[in-house]
Image (tube, grey):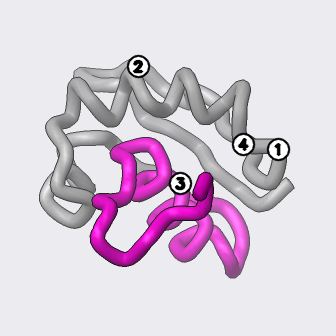
C-alpha cells in the first residue's frame, strides 16, 4: 500500500526532483527559483526550501548554491 497510486498527487519535493533530473540529464543546470516556479507549479520560496532538502536527500543529484546576486542561483548536475 506504500506505492503511489495514480489518484495520489505527486509531492512538491518529488515534482521538483523529477524536473531537475530531466533538465540536468545533459550536464549542469543553473537556475534561479523565480524562473522555474511556473514550470513546477511552486512558489520561488517553496523551491528554495525544497532545494535545501533535496541537497541532502537526492543522492542522484549534486545541488549547490552557486551565486547570491539578487536571488540565489542554484547549480544542479547528475551525481
**Cα separation between marks 2 and 3:** 22 Å
Query: Residue at left 63%, top 50%?
Result: 76
List the residue tagged with mark 1: 59
Query: Residue at left 77%, top 60%?
Result: 78
Does residue 9 appear to the left or right of 41 in the view shown?
right
List the residue tagged with mark 3: 17
Name the mark nearer the viewer: 2 or 3. Answer: 3
Query: Residue at left 19%, top 45%?
Result: 42
Q: Is residue 75 above or below residue 47?
A: below
List the residue tagged with mark 4: 58
Does 5 appear in magenta? yes
Q: Are marks 4 and 2 in contact (CB under 8 Å)?
A: no
Where's residue 72, x and y in %?
38, 26
Does residue 57 appear to the left or right of 8 in the view shown?
right
List the residue tagged with mark 2: 68
Where's residue 33, x and y in %?
29, 41
Query: Residue at left 68%, top 77%?
Result: 25
Mark 2 packing: few (<14 Cα in 10 Å), some, or many (20+)? Answer: few
**Cα separation between marks 2 and 1:** 24 Å
Q: Quadrant for the N terminus, please.
A: bottom right
Q: Are marks 4 and 3 in contact (CB under 8 Å)?
A: yes
Q: What kind of element bears circle 1?
A: loop
Where's residue 40, x and y in %?
26, 59
Amino acid at each position: 500500500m506504500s506505492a503511489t497510486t495514480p489518484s495520489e498527487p505527486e509531492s512538491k519535493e518529488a515534482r521538483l526532483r523529477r524536473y531537475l533530473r530531466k533538465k540536468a540529464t545533459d550536464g549542469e543546470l543553473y537556475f534561479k527559483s523565480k524562473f522555474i516556479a511556473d514550470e513546477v507549479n511552486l512558489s520561488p520560496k517553496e523551491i528554495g526550501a525544497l532545494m535545501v532538502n533535496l541537497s541532502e536527500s537526492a543522492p542522484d543529484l549534486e545541488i549547490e548554491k552557486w551565486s547570491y546576486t539578487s536571488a540565489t542561483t542554484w547549480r544542479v548536475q547528475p551525481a
